[in-house]
Image (cartoon, rainbow, N blue to C red):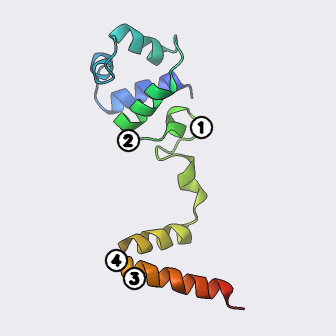
Amino acid sequence: MHVYQRLRDLREDADLTQKQVAALLYMHLTQYRRYECGESELPMYLAIRLAELYDVSLDYIAGMTDSKRGLTQSSLGESETRLIEGFRQLDPVRQGRLLERLEMLRTAR
């Protein structure tokens, strides 16, 4: 999928008009239309702003993945994701204890 198609889909999913997005990006409507139609190449700084606007990854906007969260999401397995989520729910003291135990397990033979 081309970048310009992603931009259009994201805009339509957000129920925004081209004019509204152009205003949010502080640019002229004609220039935004050129990006969305593929007539002009989208600069990196605008891709970043659009990713922030739509809460998606740059990988998604670039068409490198169909996951709006990006390529890095798929690099973790289910158990790794559960570990991270559990770690984040702990207070800082318990996080420290867990890290100490992890180090003990790693060095134990």
**Mark 1 and mark 4 in contact (Cβ < 8 Å)?**
no
Instruction: Please tell me which residue is depicted at 42% across the width and 35% down the height of the picture.
Output: 51
**Mark 4 and mark 3 in contact (Cβ < 8 Å)?**
yes
Instruction: Please tell me which residue is depicted at 50% across the width and 45% down the height of the picture.
Output: 67
Quarter where residue 109 is shown? bottom right
**CA distance separating discs 2 and 1:** 16 Å
Mark 4 vs mark 1: give the one in front. Answer: 4
Query: N-terminal of the two: label 1 or label 3?
Result: 1
Q: Name the element at disc 2.
A: loop
**Mark 3 and mark 1 in contact (Cβ < 8 Å)?**
no
The residue to which callout 2 is attached is 55
Foreground residue, 45 or 76? 45
Q: Name the element at disc 4.
A: loop
What percent of the width, then of the height, locates residue 81? 50, 66
Numbered label attached to residue 94: 3
The residue to which callout 4 is attached is 91
Instruction: Please tell me which residue is depicted at 55% across the width and 32% down the height of the picture.
Output: 62
The residue to which callout 1 is attached is 64
**Image: 100 above or below 54:** below
Mark 2 vs mark 4: give the one in front. Answer: 4
Query: N-terminal of the two: label 2 or label 1?
Result: 2
18 left or right of 77? left
**CA distance separating discs 3 and 4:** 6 Å
Could you classify mark 4 by the number of other residues whose Cα lies within 10 Å: few (under 14), some (14-19), or many (20 or more)?
A: few
Instruction: Please tell me which residue is depicted at 52% across the width and 10% down the height of the picture.
Output: 39
**CA distance separating discs 4 and 1:** 36 Å
Q: In which quarter of the image is the N terminus?
A: top right
What percent of the width, then of the height, locates residue 25? 33, 23
Could you classify mark 3 by the number of other residues whose Cα lies within 10 Å: few (under 14), some (14-19), or many (20 or more)?
A: few
Amino acid carrying label 2: it is: Asp
